[in-house]
Image: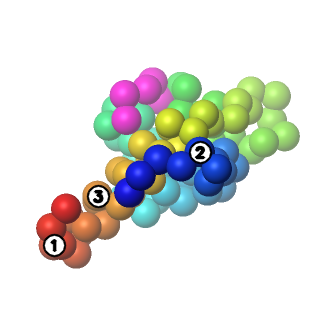
Amino acid sequence: MKPDASHHDPRPEYLRSLIQRAGLSQRQAADRIGISERLLRYYLVAADHPSYRAAPYPVQFALELLADSMWRLEKAEPI
């Protein structure tokens, strides 16, 4: 998987689906991609909430890689 910022999708619903697909808690996902749990929650709160912050593409890409790698491990496919 190569980074492609033209696929940037900072919607909280999409980011939450990646974390769910990885089978991790928000805390575990934040730890694995190297950000604080609080910052991740800013990205995951509803877009109309006052504390919402749009996730930058590198955060989205890291979550996509995490979800993909966890799926591959679950399916026992070589990475």
| Residue at point 16%, 72% (across, down) | 76
* Mark 2 closeness class: few <14, some 14–19, many ≥20 residues within 10 Å: few
What's the residue type where badge 3 is placed? Ser
Quarter placement of the C terminus: bottom left
Q: Which residue is mark 2?
A: 5
**Residue 64 covered by magenta stretch:** no
What's the residue type where badge 2 is placed? Ala
The quarter of the picture where residue 34 lies is: top left
14 with respect to 34 (left or right): right
The quarter of the picture where residue 7 lies is: bottom right
**Mark 2 or 3: the one toward you:** 2
Of pointers 1 and 2, the one earlier in the residue sequence: 2
For residue 27, say whether it is visible: no
Residues at marks 2 and 3 touching, judged by CB atoms closer than 8 Å: no
What's the residue type where badge 1 is placed? Ala
- Image coords of residue 66 (percent x, y): 35, 51
35 with respect to 12 (left or right): left
The magenta region covers 33-37
Q: Which residue is mark 1?
A: 76
**Mark 1 or 2: the one toward you:** 2
Determine the secondary structure under disc 1.
loop
| Residue at point 62%, 42% (across, down) | 44
11 with respect to 63 (left or right): right
Reply above or below: 7 against 28.
below
| Residue at point 53%, 25% (across, down) | 38
Q: Which residue is mark 3?
A: 69
Of pointers 1 and 3, the one earlier in the residue sequence: 3
Between marks 1 and 2, how big is the CA–CA gap? 29 Å
